Every structure is written in C-alpha cells, then in structure tokens.
C-alpha cells in the first residue's frame, strides 16, 4: 500500500523510535534513520539563526603519512574548515571537532556554536567527509583496492579527517597566519571532540599532542585498526580529562564498547575518564539535525513520503522536532560539552560530581535522570 503526505508522517513517527542501526560504516537504509531536528536550546541551535553560518577557511594540505608497510602517502589539495567563535568575549580555548562517517559539520552546528558561546572557545571542525573530492578521488584512483579491501573507504576517510585535524592543531599551535584572523592564541588550552567515527578518532589525534589533555566524545566508534581508540590512542597517551557519552539504545556506538574505552583510560591514568550512558539514547541523538553528507534528511525523505505542500511540510517539521526534543539526549549532551570545555578553559578538573550538578541546573529534571554517570 502506498502512503502519501500526512499518512506517511504518522507512519514515520510510529516507527522512528524503533530505528534499526546496522554496522557502523554500512550504507544507511531508510529503516535505519531516526529523524532528529534541532533541539532549540538557544537561538544558535536554530537553523534560521545560522543562516550566516560559522567562519569558513580553506587550508592547503601539507601532511605526509607512512603506513604499516612503509609506504609514504603525500596529501594534496585543500581542506575546508569551519570555525565557530564566541559571539561575545575573548577566545579562551580551542576545541577541535570531528564528525561521523556519513556526516559533515552541518549536522552539529547548533551544538558547536552554543559550546563556543558558553565556554568561550573556538571550535575548529574540518569538513572532510566521505563525499569530499579528496576522499573520493583517492578511492576512485584505485577502485580494485576497494574490492580487495572492504574497509578501504573507512581507512581513507579516517586518515584524511584525522590528519587534516592534526594539521590544523599544529598550525594553531604555531600561530600560523591562516588562523590569525580568529584571534586564537597559540598557547590557549586545547581539546579534541567528536561524534561516532570522529569520536573514535579523537583518542589517537589527542595522543599525538602531549599538551592536549581534554577529550570529549559522543558515541565513539573504532573503525579500522590503524585508528583504534584504545590501541592507537589511550595506550599511547591517555588524556587527563575525558568524557565519553553513549546511548543505551545505540547499536552502532554500543554502550559497552564506549564504556570499555573509558575503562582503558582510567586504567592508564587513574580517575581520568567519565562514562555517561544516556537512557534510551540513539546514535543519531547527538546530532542537531540529520544530514546525509551535507543534505538535510528531511529534504531527502519528503519527496518519497509524498510531503509536498506547505502545511504538510510544517506538520512534518513539527512532529520530528517533538521526537527530537522529547528525550533530552541532545540538550543534555550539549550541556555536558559546554561544562567540559568550561572546565578546560578555567584550568579545573572535570569531575563526575560537578558534571552532574551542571546538568541538573541546565536541563529539565525529567531529562537529567536519563544520564547515568560512572568511572569504570
């Protein structure tokens, strides 16, 4: 039976909380998608507020890597970055954000801008995604390699995103002219954060810089062995402060796997890591809005669901917004990110007690109860 318009909206609502989440890097199917529009905690979470968007900067790549077989890879072309700056006050710190496998920075813009505003940090997010010409060009240059190695796409993207981010860190630490206009001091406290694949990459990226001692992740996923969060990150150098969030209903960044990363951090460096499980939390629940690459999911789904008229689109937006804001996952995650980086810029230890108190003061009581804190 073919459904159209309002009927499809209702059908989508009925099935959205039962989203099936398959392998972390498998192509998304319609049944794997949960609609998550902006939560609207503040003006900067509103897409209309972000029409101007964050600052953007193109940076020429200059990194080289050597793989396990001793083969050298020299980067080429330019990377696109987005820089979120506090709307008021001086930049007191810098956080480097990495997105998920099928995402771009656009999926997190509200959260990143709010964090910049409330923690007085610059948030630098490299926009190197699976559909970027740099990644696609590398994959298409040797299509047989993808047939021989099914994880090839994962490896190429993880290498590109992590190395691009590391280059930005090095440039800001060196006071490079490319970032001068943003008034980010080269000696300000710095941290690394990310979601899904980007969360998993946060550990090896942070481990490459002894002065970076803050890692904040949402549903981190390991990906390929070359970028394993524990083996290539925590065991190399555990950060003094890390906070790892996971949803109990997440079948991609599984809660038990995320907890294991936190436990490994605490084993390497005692009381350094806090694990937070979000009751009924989903993998996509950490995103301000769902996009596939850079295209809003609502734009992709509307034609297939027969949603064409203004009234139907308004209802669709309203319903999906309710689904998003009714759990508290996004609001609470954003609040914890703000707390985490406020502690960083103020030179204070990130503690479970303070994090819980901050969350209780910042979001509804019925939502804060969904966040379970521990130090495994």
Image: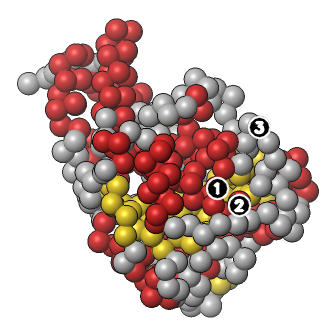
Q: Are marks 3 and 1 in contact (CB under 8 Å)?
A: no
- Which label number is shown at residue 88? 3
* Residue linked to disc 1: 342
Return the x and y of residue 167 as percentages of the image width and height: 74, 67
Placement of the C terminus among the 4 image quadrants: bottom left
Could you tell me which secondary element the residue under label 1 belongs to? helix
Circle nearer the viewer, 3 or 2: 2
Residue plotted at (73% across, 44% down)? 85
- Which label number is shown at residue 346? 2
Could you tell me which secondary element the residue under label 3 belongs to? loop
- Which label number is shown at residue 120? none
Tell me if 205 is positioned left or right of 183 in this view: left
Return the x and y of residue 308 as percentages of the image width and height: 34, 14
In this rendering, the answer to whether 207 lies above or below 274 is: below
Tell me if 341 is positioned left or right of 216 in this view: right
The answer to whether residue 370 is seen in the rendering is yes
Residue plotted at (66% across, 79% down)? 208
> Disc 3 or 2, which lies upstream in sequence?
3
């Amino acid at each position: 039976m073919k459904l159209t318009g309002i009927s499809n909206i209702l059908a989508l609502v009925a099935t959205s909380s039962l989203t099936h989440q398959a392998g972390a890097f498998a192509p998304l199917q319609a049944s794997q998608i949960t609609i998550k529009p902006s939560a609207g905690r503040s003006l900067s979470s509103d897409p209309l507020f972000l029409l101007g968007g964050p600052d953007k900067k193109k940076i020429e790549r200059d990194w080289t890597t050597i793989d396990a077989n001793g083969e050298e890879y020299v980067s080429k072309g330019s990377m696109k970055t987005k820089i979120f700056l506090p709307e008021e006050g001086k930049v007191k710190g810098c956080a480097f954000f990495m997105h998920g496998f099928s995402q771009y920075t656009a999926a997190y813009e509200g959260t990143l801008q709010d964090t910049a505003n409330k923690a007085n940090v610059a948030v630098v997010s490299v926009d190197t995604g699976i559909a970027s010409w740099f990644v696609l060009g590398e994959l298409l240059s040797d299509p047989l390699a993808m047939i021989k190695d099914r994880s090839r796409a994962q490896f190429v993207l993880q290498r590109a995103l992590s190395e691009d981010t590391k280059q930005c860190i090095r440039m800001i630490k060196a006071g490079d002219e490319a970032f001068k206009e943003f008034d980010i001091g080269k000696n300000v406290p710095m941290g690394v954060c990310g979601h899904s694949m980007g969360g998993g990459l946060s550990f090896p990226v942070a481990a490459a810089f002894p002065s970076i001692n803050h890692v904040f992740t949402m549903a981190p996923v390991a990906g390929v062995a070359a970028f394993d969060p524990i083996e290539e990150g925590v065991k190399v150098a555990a950060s003094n402060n890390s906070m790892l969030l996971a949803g109990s209903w997440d079948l991609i960044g599984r809660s038990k796997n995320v907890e294991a990363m936190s436990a490994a951090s605490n084993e390497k460096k005692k009381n350094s890591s806090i694990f937070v499980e979000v009751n009924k939390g989903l993998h996509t629940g950490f995103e301000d809005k769902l996009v596939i690459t850079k295209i809003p999911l609502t734009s992709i789904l509307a034609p297939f669901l027969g949603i064409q008229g203004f009234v139907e689109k308004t209802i669709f937006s309203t319903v999906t917004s309710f689904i998003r804001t009714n759990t508290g996952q996004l609001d609470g995650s954003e609040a914890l990110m703000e707390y985490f980086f406020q502690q960083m810029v103020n030179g204070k230890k990130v503690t479970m007690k303070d994090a819980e108190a901050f969350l209780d003061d910042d979001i509804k009581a019925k939502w804060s109860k969904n966040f379970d804190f521990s130090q495994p």
